[in-house]
Every structure is written in structure tokens, then in C-alpha cells.
Amino acid sequence: DASNTLALYALGRLLRDLGKPEEALEPLTLCRSLLPGSIPAALACAGALAELGRFAEAVGLLDQSELPSSDEAAKSLLAQAGDQANREGRDRDAIGFYRRLASLSPDSAAVWGTLGAVLLRAGDWLEAEAALRRAADLDPSDEGHTRRLADALKFQGRLEEVRELYRRHWVPRRASAWWPADGVTGDGPPAARASITKLVHDIEQLTYLDSLGYLPAGAAAILPALRDLAAELIRSGRRPGEVFTLTPEQLAPVQSLYNRMVHLADPVLDGSPVLNPDLDWSRIGQDFRDSGPGYAVIDGLLSPQALDGLTRYCQESTFWFDLEHPGGYLGAYLQEGFDHDILFAMARGIQAALPDIVGPHVLRQVWAFKYDQRLSGIPPHADDAAVNVNLWIAPDDACPDPDAGGLLVYPAKVPGDWGFDDYNSINPRFDDFIRDHGGTPHRIGHRRNRALLFSSDAVHATESVDFRPGYLNRRINITMLFGYR
């Protein structure tokens, strides 16, 4: 009767208050069976399940009750169930809980953002895009939503749309004194991170820009202070590739110039083809298929106009911000201004020219590396993609040995079940694999406008760099990743 049912409910609540949810569950479950339409009984029983960490069961119980959409207890249980599934890597379950939570909290940017993040991890890029757009619209100040939205677009190969997001949100900051908190690398903000390699490069590049008349007067006036800083650090015995943080006193005289987007070149495409129209793509495709690891050398990839424009873009633009590589080379990336139309036209042209090798795969990433005149190369590794395209644009006579300065491609592919850390970092497992299966690598020497097309599973390495002195002789390679492993 009613009094017994009330007693069961009171007993269950008391046991929960005493910290005994497992004992509370029995009277509360019985109470709910006697009053199946009671929302308080359902919530109390679900609460006991939640206290036992059985969040999915608690949500399932609430599914059988008609709770109002504004009920905070239901939202809390859905959030906890989603968080638990998320922590345990049960993406499908987490997505289900977060979807329901989003329907109950349609104006919560945090909920939509969390849903989008799990969808992104699960590979549901279109739905992730929709959820993250919703989150970014609701809370434009949270840059995490926009960064993940860019990732969702990137995974779909929509890099030109990604470029617009990056240009709107992050590229302008490289020209200002403000740095986002999530841009901090190591133990200091990006503006304060330095190496001798980076400082020497920037001095050479800024001096070159000044000779062309492209350096603003205020920047030119600071250039002597940057030279003084580099000289001081060289005298202190810093190794060229060693990365460190400038002190506030060291940074202050140069902070409006060093590591900034001082100049972004914009070579104009005149409507002429980006790719060399005389290339024999049928032969290139056959070379790729006939080779053991899957690779082909493409000499003269770009038309003269496109090659000249891309070279100017890389030599003149001050977007070489990434200095954190052990070898000391510098990197430029899509998210920080390396995004010219020539790059996208080049990718589309290769996809169209090789429809069976590159055509099925979206362009997922593009970057450039620039090297000091003498550096050790990048050790053997593979990449997280289906197909790579590497292009070199430094002058032929920059490399004294015409057979050196390029790439080594080993006659071996990494196992398909290996993860990224297995094949893209120095570790004993990969060392053993190279020793047992690597064989003698194919040596592809550096040439201006030479591209190497190869399977991303193929083990490859950059040869040691020994180029002639002079800023315009620095080795520059451009890498494009297409598709997925």
C-alpha cells in the first residue's frame, strides 16, 4: 500500500545518505516497481545506480520514465554516462549519451563541443563538423571548438575552407604581440622560443627582405638588435639546434620583429598551368606501380611560373615559426600562413593526373621544411597517410653533390597494424624492423622542381644536408599528405 511504498522510498534515500548505494538499490528498485510512473522513485533509483558508477543503467532506467526536458537530474546523469564512456574509449556509447544531452541542452556550447570532439575521434567528420559549428556559434570565444572544426574539415580534405578559418582566427596573431594560451610550447610562449638556427635564419631572411624593400621601416630599425642578440647567444656556446626560451630582457628589444608575420608574399597566378603540361603521367604512374615500395620520381613537376611563385613565397614569407625539431630545421604550416593557392592547385592537378594512385585520396595536410646549410637529415620513418608528395625548390647548384641532399626510400613498408608512434619516432621496435627488413635504400638526389611520389607506408629518410652558403641556397621541401593509412 501507499505507506509501505513510502517507507521503501525513505529507506532507500536514508541508505544513500549513509553512503550505502548498493544496499539502497534494492528498496528503491522495489519502490519503483510499485510506482512505475513515479519520477521521484525513478530518479532516486537512477541516483543510486550513478553512485555505483553504473551510469548507462541509470540512463536506461530514466528512458522508461517521462522526464521533462528541463530536468537537471536527467542532464547530469547523461553527462556522467557520456563522460564515463568517453574516458573508457567507448565512442559509440559516448556519442549516444551526448546526442541526447545536446537535445536537452540545445544552447550549451560545451555539450555540442564535447559531442563534436568525440565524433571527430570516431571518424564521423560530417556530424562532427555540424556539432562543432554549433558550439563555435554559441561560444565564439572558445577557440577549442574552432580548432576542432578545422580538424573536421581537414579530415574531409577541405583545406581551402580550413585556410579561411586559420586566416580569420590565428594567422593575424603572428603579426601582433598577443599569443593564445594553447600556443605555448615548452616553457615559454612562441614569441620567446628560440634557437641559433632560427635566429640566424631570420636575420638572413629579414636582411634579404630589406634588400628587396619589403621590410617596413620600423622592422628594419630593429634588425641590428636581432643581430646583436644572435651574436650574444652564439658566444654563450649554444648549439645551433638547441631550443631555449629567451629571457624578458633578451626578448624586449626584438619582440616586435622576431618570430612575427612581418611579410607574407602573395605571388599572383596569371592563369597559366600550375603543373608542367609536358609531363608523362602514364609513365609516372607505371613507375610507381613497378617499384617495390611504391614510388616515382617526377622531374619538372611545376610550370616555370608556378615554380617561381612558390619559390618566392617560401623565400620571402616570414612564416617559419616551428623551430622545435631535434635536427634544427624550421617548419611552416597551414594554420600559420602556409596556404597559397599554388599549393591547392598543385594538389588538385596531381589528383587529376593520377586518378588511380592519388585521385581517390583527399589532401589532408601540407607543410614546408627549411634547413640550415649543414644539418643531419630526418631519420627513417613512415607517415600517417596513403600517399606522399615531396617537392624540392632550392637551386640545383645549391647542393654540390647532385646525387645527395634528397631522400632515401627503403624497399620496405611498415606493418599495417602499427600505430603512429611505432613508425614515426625513434624506438627499439622500429630500429629492429629497419635492421631486419629495411634493405638498401633507393637514393633520390636533390633537384630543383623534382618531386617524389611515394606510398606513405614506405620507410623513408632525409639525407644529411650539405648545401652551399647563402640564404637563397637553403634546402626547402614541400610535403603533401593524401588520404589515410
Image: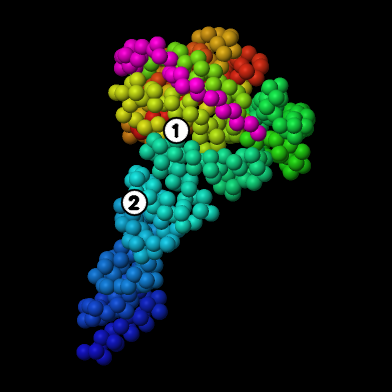
| Above-or-below relation of 30 to 227 | below
- Residue at x 49%, y 40% (from the top left corner): 164
Taking the image as shown, residue 17 lies to the left or right of residue 469, namely left
Res 420 seen here: no
Secondary structure found at label 1: strand
Query: In terms of depth relative to the viewer, which is nearer, 21 or 280?
Result: 280
Q: Which mark is residue 256?
A: none
Q: Amino acid at mark 2?
A: Asp
| Above-or-below relation of 275 to 235 | above
Marks 2 and 1, how far apart in space? 25 Å
Count of numbered badges drawn on the protein = 2
Taking the image as shown, residue 338 lies to the left or right of residue 286, namely right
- Residue at x 34%, y 51% (from the top left corner): 91
| Image spot of residue 122 (x, y percent) | 34, 46
| Image spot of residue 463 (x, y percent) | 52, 18
Q: Which residues are magenta?
A: 262-290
Q: Which mark is residue 91?
A: 2
Secondary structure found at label 2: helix
- Residue at x 50%, y 21% (from the top left corner): 270
| Image spot of residue 353 (x, y percent) | 35, 20
Query: In terms of depth relative to the viewer, which is nearer, 8 or 23?
Result: 8
Q: Which residue is mark 1?
A: 365
Q: Residues within 10 Å of mark 2 (few under 14, many from 20)?
A: many
